[in-house]
Amino acid sequence: MKNNISKDMTNALMVWFDKHHREMPWRGSDDPYHIWVSEMMLQQTQVSTVEKYYSQWIERFPDVFTLAEAKLEEVLKVWEGLGYYTRARNFHKGAKYIAENAVSKEFPFPDNYDDWLRVPGVGPYTAAAVSSIAFKYPAGVVDGNVKRVMARLFCIDTNIAAQTYHRQIFKIINEGFYDHHPGWVNQAWMELGSLQCTQRPDCSTCPLKEHCCAFKKDKVKDFPLKIEKKKIPTRFGAAFIIKQGEKFLMVKRPDEGFLGGLWEYPGFTLKEPEHSYLERFCRKNKIEIINELKERAKHTYSHFHQELTIYNAELNGKWENSDWTEYKLVDEVEMNKLPKSKITINISKSDHHS
C-alpha cells in the first residue's frame, strides 16, 4: 500500500497547528539568515535553551556577512554552552561560503533545496527547513519528531535510523503540501511530534487519529520500531589547574575535530584505562602534581561519558606540547572571554579555582 498524506490530513494538521503552535522568536520570520540560525541551534537542543542563545547571536552577528567576517574563536564564545560545537564551526564555514558566493548583499542566499545542500555544513534537514520556510520551496523536513509521527500514521516498521527510512519519509512529505505553504506544513509536522505525537502521546486529542494506522490498530506503542540503544562508555582522564601568580595555563584545541577551537586546562581523556599514563603525561609535560581534588568533573556527550580527576599542579619549565595549537596564561577576566566546553567551565567555576 502506498503511504500518502491526503489533502484532508494536511488540512486537519494545519487547523491544529494554527490553534496549538508555540510562539518562538524566529517563528513567522521569512529571513533566511534568522531561520538558518534557529535551525542550526535547534539540532539536538531544546527550544527553551535555544531562545536565549538565538537573541544573543542575532545581536552579535546580525547578518551572514558579520558572521563570515568574525573570528572562529568569537563565534565559539557566543555559542559556548550550547554543545555540539561542530554545528558552530560548520555554521561559520557556511556563512563564509555564502558571503563569498553572494550574487548581491541584498540577496545572498540560495532559494532552493539543492543549492542549500552545497553550502558547507548544511545537510538535508537544514536545507529543507531554510528553503521551505524562507522561500516556500517544497522540500520535506525530516527530524526525529517527524519520523515518529510518520511511523505511527502509516504503521511503518522500518528502523527509523536507516537512510532508506529517511528518504521514504522525505518523499511522503514532499507529496503532501497541497496548496499550503511548505515551510508552515513542515513546522506543523515537527510541532505535532513535539507536542502531540510524543513518546507517550494522548491520542484522544490528536487531529489525525481517524487517519492514523497505529491508532486504528491499537498499536501506537509498537511504533516507531524500538531500536536498542547502545550503552555509551565512560572515558576517564585528568585536568591540571596550573597557576602561575594570578594566572592559569590554558591550551587551545585544534580547530577541526572534537571540541575544535575551544580552550581547556591541560589534560587528557583515555578511551581505555591505562594506569601508568598519568605519570607519563606529567613527565612529558613537566607537570608536578601538588594535590588531587575530591570532586570529579563529569560531562556526557552523545557517544561517551567523560570523567576527569582534577589536580592542582605546577610546571617545572616552559609548556611545550603540539597536541594543542596555542597556550596562554590568563587571569579570571581573560579566562571568561575564552570559548570553553561545559566541563572546562565547570572546573573554572569550582571552589578550588582560586
Image (spheres, grey):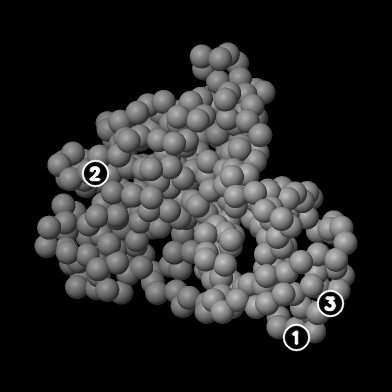
Name the residue rendered at 45%, 29% in the picture.
59
Instruction: Say whether disc 3 or disc 1 marks the residue closer to the N-terminus.
Output: 1
Instruction: Say whether disc 2 or disc 3 marks the residue closer to the N-terminus.
Output: 2
Q: Mark 3 points at which residue?
A: 280
Question: Residue 108: x, y in percent?
Answer: 55, 20
User: Quarter holding the C terminus?
Assistant: bottom right
Name the residue rendered at 67%, 72% in the picture.
311
Is label 2 in a helix, a strand or a loop? loop
Is label 1 in a helix, a strand or a loop? loop
Kindly report the distance in space between the C-alpha atoms of the residues bearing marks 3 and 1: 10 Å
Kindly report the distance in space between the C-alpha atoms of the residues bearing marks 2 and 3: 54 Å
Kindly report the distance in space between the C-alpha atoms of the residues bearing marks 1 and 2: 52 Å
Q: So how many labels did they put on this image?
A: 3
Question: Residue 168: x, y in percent?
Answer: 44, 54
Q: Nearer the viewer, residue 137 or 244?
A: 244
In this image, 312 relative to 35: left or right?
right
- Which tag is nearer the camera, tag 2 or tag 3? 3
**Dot 2: few (<14), some (14–19), or many (≥20) neighbours within 10 Å?**
few
Q: Is residue 278 above or below residue 156?
A: below
**Dot 3: few (<14), some (14–19), or many (≥20) neighbours within 10 Å?**
few
Q: Is residue 354 above or below residue 66?
A: below
Type of the residue with mark 1: His
List the single residue furthest toward the left: 204
- Which tag is nearer the camera, tag 1 or tag 2? 1
Type of the residue with mark 3: Arg
Name the residue rendered at 22%, 65% in the picture.
201
List the single residue furthest toward the bottom: 275
Q: Nearer the viewer, residue 323 or 34?
A: 323
Q: Name the residue under label 2.
A: 22
Type of the residue with mark 2: Arg
Q: Name the residue under label 1.
A: 275
